[in-house]
């Protein structure tokens, strides 16, 4: 398998290290605008070889991972799609997805992505082969993403140690505006506000652990984050407006000397629920279905599952004789199998078989019937 990395900083370098450590018969070629970065990537073992141009890097690639800054990502995606082979899968690691998908048009080779992993430090020297272990990696197919390309990217992400989770672009960008981009804005604003407390003598005010905790990301990678703010400006501005409304309400309640113990307690409970929520159970169910062999069929199925909150932990696609249909085997958490069956029935897709499988190695292989799946999910 030949993997092309377009951009070999922290994330791209970590993809290369993880791929070389965990995949068999893989060769990783890298390209980056910085010759020094490429040299460093070779020295730490993130790539097997460098390419002189982007076009040379993606030539004959089976999979391309684009790890360019968000401000340049749509343009680079277009360059990659112009140069990549017809049977190549293309994905990216950007934190805003709508501009990437728009740039690709209807090219079925693209399955956009976004790993929820990183570091306070940037640069390939901080890359790690275990960076993605256990982390959510959003997969964001568009309406005409090829099923085989989706399967290829899904499997690759799993092999890197991440948990692939399908989501649509609009939901992804709104979610990231709330849980990722907004905290960076708030951290910056809080640092500015505390900075004003220095007064005319410019003395640095004393700070406690609370300030250090909530401002950890302030000022992070200015070039990268300026591009993110711009790319997701509509969703982010909407979330900022909502925060202003909430802060105004809290200010009113504080001025009125209201008792805020209940508010403090409720937010503590809500934070535990949000932070501690498990993404998937340990036991998976395999469901086998037959779908039409047409562009976008698998993407439609994956996005329908995502809309209903059912995660596809793994899948495989195989064409059936004649080429008009394909067999799709997909694995979802056992507790979500009932919802998965109901959704497939809604879509008019017949389930032709299934197995209960071990999440990590699928070693047990005990047969599960459709009735078993329905009963297990209801109990």
Image (cartoon, helix red, strand yellow):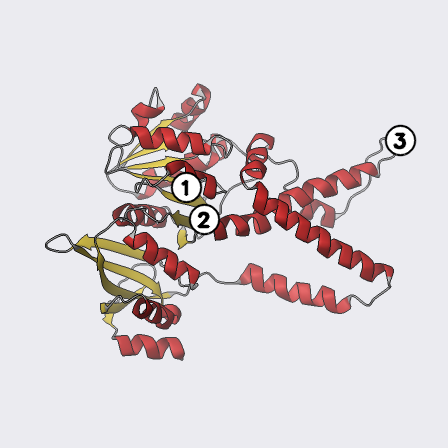
208 to the left or right of 78: right
Of badges 2 and 3, the one in the foreground is: 2
* Label 2 sits on residue: 169
Q: Residue at x 77, y 58 (%)?
A: 250
Of badges 1 and 3, the one in the foreground is: 1
322 to the left or right of 70: left
19 to the left or right of 36: left
* Label 3 sits on residue: 200
Q: In which quarter of the image is residue 207?
A: top right
In space, the residues marked 2 and 3 are separated at their CA atoms by 47 Å
First-in-chain label (1 vs 3): 1
Q: What element carries label 2?
A: helix
128 or 168: nearer the viewer: 168
Q: What element carries label 3?
A: loop
364 or 103: nearer the viewer: 103
* Label 1 sits on residue: 101
């Amino acid at each position: 398998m030949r993997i092309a990395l377009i951009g070999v900083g922290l994330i791209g370098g970590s993809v290369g290290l993880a791929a070389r450590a965990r995949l068999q018969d893989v060769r990783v070629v890298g390209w980056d605008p910085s010759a020094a970065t490429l040299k460093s990537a070779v020295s730490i073992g993130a790539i097997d070889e460098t390419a002189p141009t982007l076009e040379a890097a993606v030539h004959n690639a089976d999979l391309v991972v684009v790890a360019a800054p968000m401000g340049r990502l749509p343009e680079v995606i277009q360059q990659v799609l112009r140069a990549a082979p017809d049977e190549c899968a293309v994905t990216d690691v950007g934190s805003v997805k709508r501009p990437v998908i728009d740039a690709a048009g209807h090219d079925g080779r693209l399955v956009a992505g976004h790993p929820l992993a990183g570091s306070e430090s940037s640069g390939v020297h901080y890359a790690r082969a275990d960076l993605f272990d256990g982390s959510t990696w959003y997969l964001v197919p568009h309406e005409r993403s090829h099923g085989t390309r989706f399967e290829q990217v899904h499997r690759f992400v799993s092999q890197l140690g991440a948990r692939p989770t399908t989501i649509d672009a609009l939901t992804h960008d709104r979610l990231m505006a709330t849980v990722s981009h907004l905290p960076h804005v708030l951290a910056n604003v809080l640092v500015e506000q505390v900075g004003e407390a220095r007064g005319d003598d410019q003395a640095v005010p004393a700070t406690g652990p609370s300030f250090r905790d909530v401002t950890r990301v302030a000022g992070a990678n200015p070039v990268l984050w300026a591009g993110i703010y711009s790319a997701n400006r509509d969703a982010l501005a909407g979330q900022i407006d909502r925060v202003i409304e909430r802060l105004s309400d809290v200010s009113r309640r504080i001025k009125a000397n209201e008792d805020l113990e209940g508010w403090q307690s409720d937010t503590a409970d809500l934070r535990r629920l949000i932070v501690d929520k498990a993404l998937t159970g340990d036991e998976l169910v395999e469901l086998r279905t037959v779908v039409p062999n047409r562009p976008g069929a698998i993407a439609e199925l994956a996005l329908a599952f995502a809309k209903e909150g059912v995660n596809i932990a793994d899948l495989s696609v195989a064409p059936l004789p004649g080429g008009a249909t394909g067999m799709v085997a997909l694995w979802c958490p056992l507790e979500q199998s009932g919802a998965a069956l109901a959704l497939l029935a809604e879509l008019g897709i017949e389930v032709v078989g299934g197995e209960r499988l071990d999440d990590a190695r699928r070693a047990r292989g005990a047969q599960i019937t459709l009735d078993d799946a329905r009963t297990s999910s209801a109990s």
